[in-house]
Structures are given as structure tokens and as C-alpha cells.
Amino acid sequence: MTESLFDTNFASENEPKPPTTTSNATSQNPQTNQSNNLNGKHDQSSSNNTTTNKSNSQIKDSNKSAEDSNGYDQSTSLPSLNDKANVDALINYRVLVSAKEAGCLIGQNGQVIDSIRGETNTKAGISKLTPGTHERILTVSGKLDDAAKALSYFAQALIGSSIETYNYFPLKQLSSTPCVQNETTILRLLVPNSQMGTLIGSKGARIQQIQHNFGVSMIASKSFLPGSNERLVELQGTVNDLYDSLRVISRCLIEDFSSSVGTTYYIPRSHQLTRKTTENISFPNDMVGALIGKNGSRIQGVRKVSGAMIGISEATDGKEERVFTITGTQQAVEKAKGLLYHNLEREEQRRAEFNE
């Protein structure tokens, strides 16, 4: 068995950590392209394992406090770590990492990832690097607490690496608070949008309590990751705090695991394929009407199928052609050009047959 590289004695291995902070949170909306910061200011408070401080004005004003966990609506209460009902359930996590971070998590000759697998009895792997992108996907599968521990160990490996910054989504840090070198780090969880409700809770109650109880920052992206219906949930904190929060997050997600069926998962794609380009092509004036179609139906079809934007210049006296300006990814532009030339060929053939 691979020798352990990690300290396995978490402070809250057997007992949940008492709440130490309070925070503000707002509800999520996946239809805009901004990120929603759920990180709040932290104040000292006292609480037991299943209740929040009733005098906390942030929670009281939002009707999110509770005196008895048995009286909670499940959409506002956090699952108890003492509840063993789902303790043996299996959960699968997907975590977005950069190419450089992936190298730290794998380690020389796979030493780091092998040690984590052995220590936590989980399955873990990292996707291959797609040429032209800096993103890879870490997957961790195992029992709820085992998966939480494995993710915490990966976080510990990241703490020991140099901190990278990116200026584009989804690798760009959502929190405005920088990580403290050798103390805090970030995990970018990929969560199906269908499961966000059970994680956020009614009016943001659950995600507020996770931040409040475990001293972590949580920010959920409002937009989906490109080509998927997954959203990014950024966790920031110390290794111990991340472990505590992940144990609860696992219990929240497992309550609604069936809703993840049918998820379109994010696949890192080359940024070169998404880079916009523009091309101009000209067509004879007498063919433009046929290419546009009645009420613009034909050109609208080309736009829809190709995904490209197509602009058409105005007719000008003395010019026998009009310019079609096509803008989009290289793939979309090529698709649009092919469709336009296909429609041109069909129109020329139709006219030739009519004149015979």
C-alpha cells in the first residue's frame, strides 16, 4: 500500500464543527453571465450542531433561523452529520482544475493521487488535457465522508503549490478574497443545475448556514459552463474547513441525486475553437433575394443552423454585388459559408431548369 502523504486526523473527524461565522447570501439565477458572491462577513457566534443562533439578525430577518432541527423544513435545514441513513451512499464529484493544478494533484509518478486513493478508499482520476485549453476535470467517487476527505487531501496538495490566476471563466476566481499562501485554497465543484436547489436551500438558507457553520466562502456561478447545464460552486477555505463543509454538502446533494440524471456535463474545449473570426463574401445582386428568402426565412435558417451572425450590405448604385459579413467561431463561419454556397447553387440550378 502506498505510504500516506497526508495527516488523516481532521479536527472534526467524529464531531461536527461548531459554527464560528455568519454570512450573507442571495438566491441564484443561472440565466445571466455574472457570478453571484455568496461570501459574507464573519462574526463570532455560538451554536450547537443542529441549530443556528436565533439572535443572528441576518438569518432572523430572512426567516432562516431554527430552534429545533426536527422542526426545519428540509429545504432550509442542513442534514445532520450524526444521521447515518446515507452514510454508505456513494457520491461522485467533478472538480475543475487547471493543467498546472492537475500536475500537483497527480504528483511525480502518480504518487499524490495514489496516496489519496489508498487513504480514503475512493476512486479518483483526472481527465486528459485537451490541446488548446488549460482545464482538466478531477473526478472523485466514494462514500460521502470518504469523498469529502479525498477532496480535502486534494485541497491540501493545492495549498502546497504556487497560486495561479486566470482572467477568464471558468478558471477565473469568483471570490474577490485572495487565498492565503499555505493556509487557504479553492475547490471548483461542478454541480448539475438540477441539484443546485437542494444545495442552496429556500431563499439561500442552506448555503448561508454552510458558510456560517464552517467558515468557508461559497460562490455559485449564475451562468452554466459552456455546452453544459453544470454550474460552478467555488469553495474557499482551509483544509479542515473544506472537509467539514464537504461532508454536509455531500449529504445535501445525495438527497436529490436522482435529479442529476440527464445532466449535460462540461467538457473542456480548445479556446481556439471559440475564438471569433469574420469573413466577407460577395454575391451577385440578382441572387441576394433568393439567398435571403421570403421575409428573410432562408438567411435566418442559415444563421440558426450555423450559429454565425450574418450581415448584408445595402445595395449600391454601380455595384453588381452585395457583401455578406459572417462572424462567429471558425467552425460556425465555415458552416454558414457552406450553406450559403449550397443555396446559391440550388438557385442557379432552378433558374437554369426554368430557362430550358
Image (cartoon, rainbow, N blue to C red):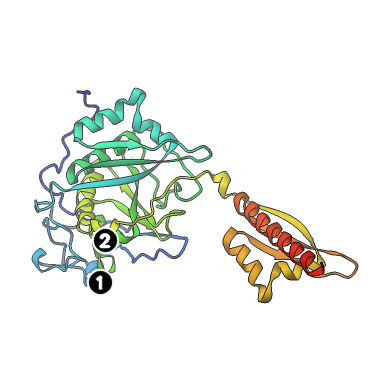
Q: Which is nearer the eye, 292 or 163?
A: 292
Amino acid identity at mark 2: Gln
Instruction: Tell me where residue 48 sits by quadrant.
Output: bottom left
Q: Quadrant of the N terminus?
A: top left
Task: Judge left or right: residue 303 versus residue 209.
Answer: right
Residues at circles 2 and 1 in contact by the CB criterion of under 8 Å? yes
Residue at (46%, 64%) from the top-left corner?
32
Q: Earlier in the sequence, mark 2 or mark 1?
A: 1
The amino acid marked with disc number 1 is Ser
Tag 1's secondary structure? loop
Q: Quadrant of residue 258?
A: bottom left
Name which residue lies at 86% across and 64% down: 320
Q: Nearer the viewer, residue 83 or 205?
A: 83
Residue 120, visible in the rendered structure: yes
Name the mark on residue 62.
1
Q: How far across and down, in percent of the image, does residue 171 sit?
A: 44, 46
Camera-side residue of 240 and 246: 246
- Residue 208 marker: 2
